Amino acid sequence: MQGLLHVIYPPQCLSCDARVTTDFGLCSNCWRDTPFIIGLTCSKCGTPLPGEDSDPGVLCDDCLTIARPWVHGRAALLYKDNARKLVLSFKHGDRLDLARPAASWMMRAAAPILRSDMLIAPVPLHWMRLLKRRYNQSALLSAAVARLAGLDHCPDLLQRRRSTGTQDDRSRDGRFANMAGAITAHPRHVKRIEGRHILLVDDVMTSGATLAAAAEACIAEGAAEISVLVMARVVKDV
């Protein structure tokens, strides 16, 4: 049946109209233009670094100067070129079909930090933003990652108590100040956090301010350890 469907509806590249051999794949040109993160990375945020892949616990310049409230972090893509196009299509273009392949890329990046007792949760949207967008892209990613990993998932573990607006035009310090106290644990799920290892999922990490606010909310309720996983990481120059 699947073969017949492929004859009638040949698989197309996730990013363009080119024919591909499998569902949820990229054509050779788009694959080449999609910057997957491989090799040695910062253990806290997933930024690619020069050096040997076997180097444990190495940190990037940002993570050496910023006190991250989590222990491990990974990212699947660099936020540029075709990866940026995919993220924006997923986030603002109703391309919900991208959640499945993105989750598989994220799973590969997260393999070294996954634990069997982890609880996976997304970074929350404020209800007004959710009403406007109609879906939380981070929740779609976290649900898909949890399914692939066979781990517990709680889509509303956290809540964003106030609207924080866009972070785009803010400085790094401004981003952290804007997010301070904005995210808390959902009252219904507080007991699920205590003593657990939490994996927080988001679509993009820039300064890490939003993930820090989410991590701090989990720590406040007694989480044992926090890790973070994102689809794409914004970096200065690589």
Image (tube, helix red, strand yellow):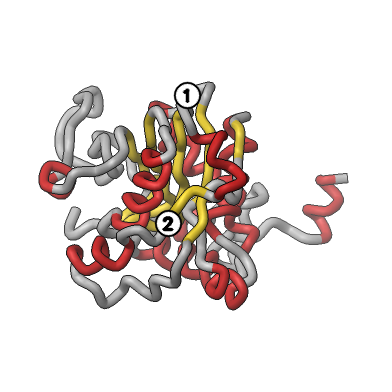
Chain-order first, disc 1 or disc 2 = 1
Task: Tell me residue 65's x, y (percent).
Answer: 11, 47
Residue 167's place in the image compared with 151, above or below, is below
Tag count in the figure? Answer: 2
Q: Secondary structure at mark 2?
A: strand
Looking at the rendering, which quadrant does residue 219 occupy? top left
**Amino acid bearing label 2:** Ile
Q: Is residue 129 visible?
A: yes
Disc 1 target residue: 115
Residue 170: give its label: none
In front of the other: 218 or 29: 218
Residue 43 relative to residue 225: left or right: left
Q: Is residue 46 above or below residue 167?
A: above
Q: Provide the residue designation for mark 2.
A: 183
Q: Is residue 77 above or below residue 129?
A: above
Residue 13, position as x, y percentages in the image: 59, 59
Real-space Cα separation, disc 1 to disc 2, in angstroms: 24 Å
- State the quadrant of the N terminus: top right
Q: Percent position (x, y) of residue 188?
A: 61, 46
Instruction: Please tell me in which quadrant of the rendered image residue 32 appears.
Output: bottom left
Visible residue check, residue 101:
no
Q: Tag 1, which secondary structure? A: loop
| Foreground residue among 50 and 47 | 47
**Where residue 229 sits in the image (x, y, percent)?**
41, 43
Which residue is located at x 81 percent, y 55 percent? 7
Residue at the image point whose x is 53% and y is 73% from the top: 129
Amino acid type assigned to the residue bearing label 1 in the image: Arg
Q: Nearer the viewer, residue 190 or 55?
A: 190
Judge left or right: residue 221 versus residue 175: right
| Label 1 close to label 2 by CB (< 8 Å) | no
